[in-house]
């Protein structure tokens, strides 16, 4: 009898264990978000397609058919009808300058200018509302984006605004009118700065085209903020524009320490809308020791942060930009150098702003 009771108690205990464990194992978690009836490109190793997905706490918990996923719908689940539309993973933009865009947008909303005629009209309208001798800086313009596939000449800029210094901003190259050349003190006797060029015509006069000489013009460019900071509101707006284009992760290239702190402030305020890796630009230094001190004093190390914000690698600027023909190339630019960048030298390969020895030293220190 005692043996029978022991077996009975053991059976009841096992039954209780199974019953108590079963619902937990079989329970379906409730999703925060479910999308049904979509064309979901998973971009997995087999590039499979699915029709539904479920998300909880920012993570996918199910991807499959409508039938597979409906079980995750609860009373508080947001359900989206995909209506057969394509759904793709978030895109990653590996080279952005959102901080610069935010600062520029705060000063002047971007205007897309597609031809030299549109550029001239914009400059003339700006000149009409500004005092004489006030500098006019155009929105960012590259010759590859203009219908004529070249920068405007000094004469074309003079025709648009003869009494205002005008700088067509190409980031690593600029086109100036005569008033801007005078204001900057650039003459036929001006020597090329290291790693750059003041382009001159056959008579030795400056044409107005400058390559990799931004430092010559820095003092004429007003900044948008007296504190040098970037508005959190404006940076968040830029990130929302990325989201509207399907970009959910970015790599911010060449931020200053203040720029990284701006990202940190956005993260602390729970307003960082895209996942960001921030590359820190090493300031121009006179010696390897200065570079080493800068790196040693960084308040973070590569990879530190969380899933939303990480400190990326360090950036050393060694040349110019490909869109305006100052990037240093292994081979000459060829015909495009003349067509796009007004370079007649068939051996032209761009500019190095640092020597190979300086580059190697910077890499070794980093």
Image (tube, rainbow, N blue to C red):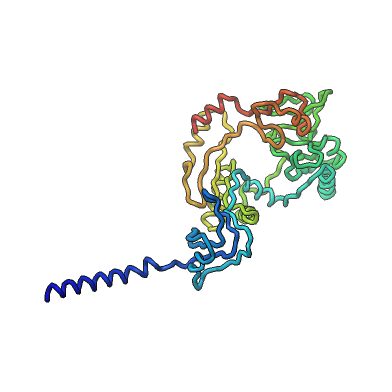
- Horizontal side of residue 122 vs 269, given as left or right: right
Residue furthest right in the image? 159
> In the picture, residue 332 is in which quadrant?
top right
Residue furthest left in the image? 1
The answer to whether residue 179 of the structure is visible from this angle is: no
Closer-to-camera residue (14/102): 14
The answer to whether residue 101 of the structure is visible from this angle is: yes
Residue at point 20%, 73% (across, down): 9
Quarter placement of the N terminus: bottom left
- Horizontal side of residue 137 vs 254, given as left or right: right
Residue at point 52%, 31% (across, down): 363
Residue 112, percent across and down? 76, 48
Q: Relative to 195, say whether 250 is above or below.
A: below
Residue furthest bottom in the image? 1
Residue at point 65%, 46% (across, down): 100
Residue 293, percent across and down? 49, 34
Q: Relative to 107, say whether 206 is above or below.
A: above
Q: How many marks?
A: 0
Residue 14, percent across and down? 25, 69
- Horizontal side of residue 179 vs 90, given as left or right: right
Residue at point 48%, 39% (across, down): 297
Q: Relative to 73, say whether 129 is above or below.
A: above
Closer-to-camera residue (73/83): 83
Q: Relative to 116, say whether 9 is above or below.
A: below
């Amino acid at each position: 009898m005692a043996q029978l009771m022991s077996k009975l108690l053991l059976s009841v205990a096992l039954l209780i264990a199974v019953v108590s464990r079963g619902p937990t194992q079989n329970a379906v978690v409730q999703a925060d978000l479910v999308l049904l009836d979509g064309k979901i490109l998973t971009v997995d190793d087999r590039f499979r397609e699915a029709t539904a997905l479920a998300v909880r706490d920012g993570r996918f918990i199910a991807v499959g058919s409508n039938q597979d996923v409906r079980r995750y719908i609860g009373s508080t689940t947001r359900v989206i009808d995909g209506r057969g539309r394509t759904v793709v993973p978030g895109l990653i933009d590996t080279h952005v300058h959102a901080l610069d865009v935010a600062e520029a947008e705060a000063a002047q909303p971007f205007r897309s200018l597609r031809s030299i005629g549109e550029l001239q009209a914009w400059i003339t309208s700006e000149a009409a509302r500004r005092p004489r001798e006030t500098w006019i800086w155009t929105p960012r313009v590259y010759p590859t984006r203009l219908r004529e596939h070249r920068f405007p000449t000094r004469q074309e800029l003079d025709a648009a605004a003869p009494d205002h210094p005008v700088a067509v901003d190409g980031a690593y190259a600029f086109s100036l009118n005569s008033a801007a050349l005078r204001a900057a003190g650039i003459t036929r006797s001006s020597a090329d700065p290291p790693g750059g060029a003041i382009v001159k015509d056959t008579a030795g006069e400056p044409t107005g085209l400058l390559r990799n000489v931004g430092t010559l013009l820095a003092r004429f460019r007003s900044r948008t903020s007296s504190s040098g900071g970037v508005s959190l509101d404006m940076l968040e707006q830029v990130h929302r524009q990325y989201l509207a284009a399907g970009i959910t992760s970015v790599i911010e290239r060449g931020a200053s320490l203040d720029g990284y702190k701006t990202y940190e402030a956005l993260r602390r305020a729970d307003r960082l809308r895209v996942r960001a890796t921030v590359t820190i630009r090493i300031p121009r230094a006179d010696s390897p020791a200065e570079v080493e001190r800068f790196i040693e004093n960084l308040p973070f190390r590569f990879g530190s942060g969380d899933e939303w914000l990480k400190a990326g690698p360090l950036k050393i600027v060694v040349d110019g930009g490909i869109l305006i023909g100052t990037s240093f190339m292994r081979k000459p630019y060829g015909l495009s150098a003349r067509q796009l960048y007004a370079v007649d030298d068939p051996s032209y390969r761009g500019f190095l702003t640092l020597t190979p020895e300086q580059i190697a030293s910077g890499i070794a220190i980093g």
